[in-house]
Amino acid sequence: MHDAISFETAGIPAATIVLEVFKELALAKRRQMGRPDFEPVIVPGNISVPDHAREKAELALPGVIEWLTTGAGKPAGERAQLVGARS
């Protein structure tokens, strides 16, 4: 979250993929950094084996592409809809 928010603040499009178990931590970090509008791409579950990591990455990819190509600069509500985040 920290790096992606720093990039976005500098005008460089960035996306963050967050496992659902870390969602609240990610949302707290964005508030702490003064960017409550920054929406992470939330993926369900956790990662216990490498195959799960690939599966989670595949789930997150459409949200990341959508965020990077159309999400930056949009109001927080619209971004949340793009990535499926629930703030």
Image (tube, rainbow, N blue to C red):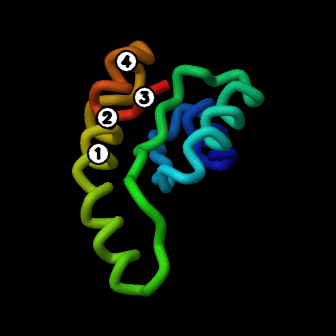
Give the alpha-carbon distance from disc 2 to disc 4, as whole Å: 14 Å
Side of 27 where 76 appears, left or right = left
Q: Position of residue 73 (x, y in %)?
A: 41, 21
- What residue does disc 1 label? 63
> How dense is the environment of label 1, judged by Cα within 10 Å: few (below 14), some, or many (20 and up)?
many
Side of 48 where 1 appears, left or right = right
Give the alpha-carbon distance from disc 4 to disc 1, as whole Å: 15 Å
Amino acid type, mark 2: Gly
Which mark lies nearer to you, 3 or 1? 3
- What residue does disc 4 label? 74
- What residue does disc 3 label? 86
- State yes or no: discs 1 and 2 in contact (Cβ < 8 Å): yes
Q: Position of residue 42 (x, y in %)?
A: 42, 46
Side of 81 where 44 appears, left or right = right
Disc 4 secondary structure class: loop
**With respect to residue 76, does 18 lie above or below?**
below
Amino acid type, mark 3: Arg
- State yes or no: discs 4 and 3 in contact (Cβ < 8 Å): no
Q: Position of residue 58 (x, y in %)?
A: 26, 65
In the depicted view, which residue is nearer to us: 57 or 14? 57
Precedes in sequence: disc 2 or disc 4: 4
Give the alpha-carbon distance from disc 3 to disc 1, as whole Å: 14 Å
Q: Residue at x 38, y 15 (%)?
A: 77
Precedes in sequence: disc 1 or disc 2: 1
Precedes in sequence: disc 4 or disc 1: 1
Which mark lies nearer to you, 2 or 4? 2
Q: Residue at x 34, y 41 (%)?
A: 68
